[in-house]
Amino acid sequence: MEPIIFKATDRVSKHYKKRVEQILSRFDDIRELIEHQASKGTRVEKEIRQLLIEFLPEMYQYSSGIVIDNSGSECDRSKQEDILIIDKLFNPKLFIDEEPSIYPVDVIYCGIEVKTSIDEKELKTAVKNIESLKKLKFIEDSVSYHKSNSIVSSNTSSPIGIIFAFDTTFKSSKTLLKHYNDAIADVAPEHRPNLLCVINRGIIGISKNNKPMIEVFGLIGQDESGNTGEMTTKSSDLYYQSGGYNYPKMLIGKDYFIIDPSRTMLGFLQYLVDLLLNKVIVSKTNILNHFIPDEMNKRIGIEMK
């Protein structure tokens, strides 16, 4: 007897299940109908950008472009698959009508690398791209703000770095973790991605032991005894089919966990909001003072007699 898929009763879970199914359906169309890789990246990035725009508060702006620091270093985030989450409230735009857009690293909350599907090569490239953003020199400052009816103080830091993919060629947790560990091995801990999210597999972060750790969001079902839990199968078929929908799988040990992409997306959004809430940027500092060199700030003052 086939297990019965547990249908969430809360409004949030039902909403995102429907929304993610729509996105994944469009993703499958993109993957099957578009042959040009760059065009695929553009369409996929558009889907994720639209979701974030609709989800996150209006204090954030979304763009792509070149990110610079006050030492003269820069990294190019103007590629189609890149998303920058930028401060919209506190800091002036230092560069106007530039194409591609240029942003000081100090106004960047987050950089997201978006991939259709990620393999060993794409993973290493995405990690290096995140590293190049995080290595930029930021203005060091302590910022006080309200949190949970209290005033807390946090130090500014490098931008959050996230890799987001719809799928991957790695079918087991062991293989995915190994390749991710290899990709970050020569990257300083402070320059590594904060998260790797693969909708069809799970979310990878770093454990307290400083090792990659994956969280898998399994499809919830009820067995014939009425017990509710995450569904597994011994079958190595690529997908688990139920109700006209193909659920991806992740091999963990000897069992295949059936993945619920909508739960993975909700988990990703939860982590993203927490990261953004804990990330502070300079808000009471004249950023111009940090980007105009001393020799250009020389002035002649003449007092009226």
Image: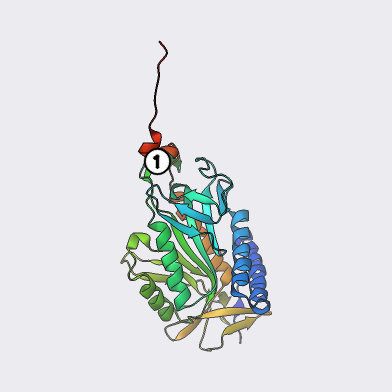
- Could one spot residue 184 in this view of the protein? yes
Tell me the quarter of the image containing the N terminus. bottom right
**Above or below 286: residue 155:** below
Element marked by disc 1: helix
Percent x, y of residue 115: 54, 70
Task: Identify the residue shown where x is 40% and y is 77%.
Answer: 179
* Residue 215, quarter of picture: bottom left
**Above or below 190: residue 140:** above
- Could one spot residue 276 in this view of the protein? no
**Mark 1 closeness class: few <14, some 14–19, many ≥20 residues within 10 Å:** some
* Residue 176, quarter of picture: bottom left
Residue bearing the label numbered 1: 290
Tell me the quarter of the image containing the C terminus. top left
- Image check: 162 left or right of 16? left
**Above or below 162: residue 119:** below
Percent x, y of residue 84: 52, 56
- Image check: 278 left or right of 263? left
- Image check: 139 left or right of 15? left
Task: Identify the residue shown where x is 37% and y is 73%.
Answer: 181
